[in-house]
Image (cartoon, rainbow, N blue to C red):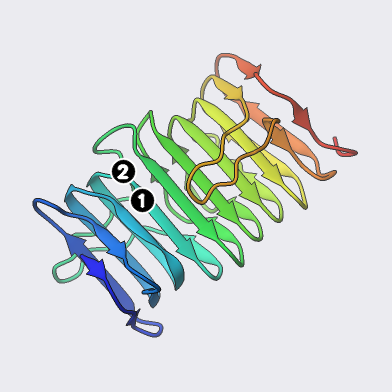
Amino acid sequence: ITLNNDINAGTGTVYLTSAGAGAGITEAGAAKVTAGTLGMNVTGAGNIVTNNSNVVNVLGAKTANGNVQFKNTQALGVTTVGASGNFAGTTNGIDTSATTGKTVDVLLTAGALTLNNDITTNTTGNVLLTAAAGISEAGAAKITTGTLGMNAGAAIVANNANNDVTTFGATTTAGGIQYQDANALTLNNVGASGNFAGTGAVAVSTAGGNIDVKNGAAALTLSNDVNAGAGL
């Protein structure tokens, strides 16, 4: 599916499903989606690249064998989108776990990013989250991936004890960083990729906000600096 012009549902829901050979969902030119809820499924081998100035309140997306890249111009909730009509539902908030090693890349140019349901790439791959304001997990929402990179303009609170990543890197220009993980964890810088600007030379940094990281089992390893400025 290629969007050559806008889809505008106002506060309604947009369901997009791409199947079979040559599957994928992309935006061409300046095409964007305006919707209360956007659900996307790619059931064949193909990526979701909806990286224009979308105006969406709730996003759910799933691929069978592909990456997910999404840009939004306002606050966003990543949430499971239920089945309806031709749309089979998304299972999780964003899910690429059927094929390991994929990347989820979400950018908000304004507002906060809230994970209301899981983001998963399985045990390998990358989750790269960027928000002009804060990033948080609500309820039981968790992240499962190989490398998790977060950049925010306000506090990062990803404190679900069931998060399960191998490598974590995060920066914020205001507020603190609180992160919890279920297993062994390495704090390391995460390089720039796609929408994600990277964490620089440090693993975890704030502009004076507190940094609070906990893992529930095995070792916590610092492979690069942790810098809280004047914070704790």
**Left or right: 86 as drawn, with respect to 68:** left
Tag 2, which secondary structure?
Answer: loop
x, y (%) of residue 148?
52, 36
Name the residue rendered at 41%, 59% in the picture.
79
What amino acid is at disc 2? Answer: Thr
Instruction: Determine the image quadrant of residue 14.
Output: bottom left
Q: Quadrant of the C terminus?
A: top right
**Left or right: 167 as drawn, with respect to 48:** right
Q: Nearer the viewer, mark 1 or mark 2?
A: 1
Name the residue rendered at 68%, 40% in the picture.
178
- Along the line of sight, which residue is nearer the eye, 225 or 143? 225
x, y (%) of residue 12?
35, 81
Count of numbered tags: 2
Disc sitting over residue 96 in the figure: 2
Question: Looking at the image, which residue sits at the far right?
Answer: 230
Characterize the local packing of mark 2: few (<14), some (14-19) or many (20 or more) Cα atoms within 10 angstroms. Answer: many
Residue 34 in the image: above or below residue 48: below
Q: Quadrant of the N terminus?
A: bottom left
Q: Is residue 95 visible?
A: yes
Name the residue rendered at 12%, 56% in the picture.
19
Tag 1, which secondary structure?
Answer: strand
Residue 159 in the image: above or below residue 155: above
**What whole-number distance in Å separates the C-alpha atoms at marks 1 and 2?**
8 Å
Residue 153 in the image: above or below residue 38: above
Question: Looking at the image, which residue sits at the far front?
Answer: 29
- Along the line of sight, which residue is nearer the eye, 196 or 59? 196
Name the residue rendered at 61%, 66% in the picture.
111
x, y (%) of residue 145?
43, 34
Residue that badge 1 annotates: 68
Which callout, 1 or 2, points at the residue further toward the start of the chain?
Answer: 1
Look at the numbered discs 1 and 2 and tell me whether their residues touch, using CB distance below 8 Å.
Answer: yes
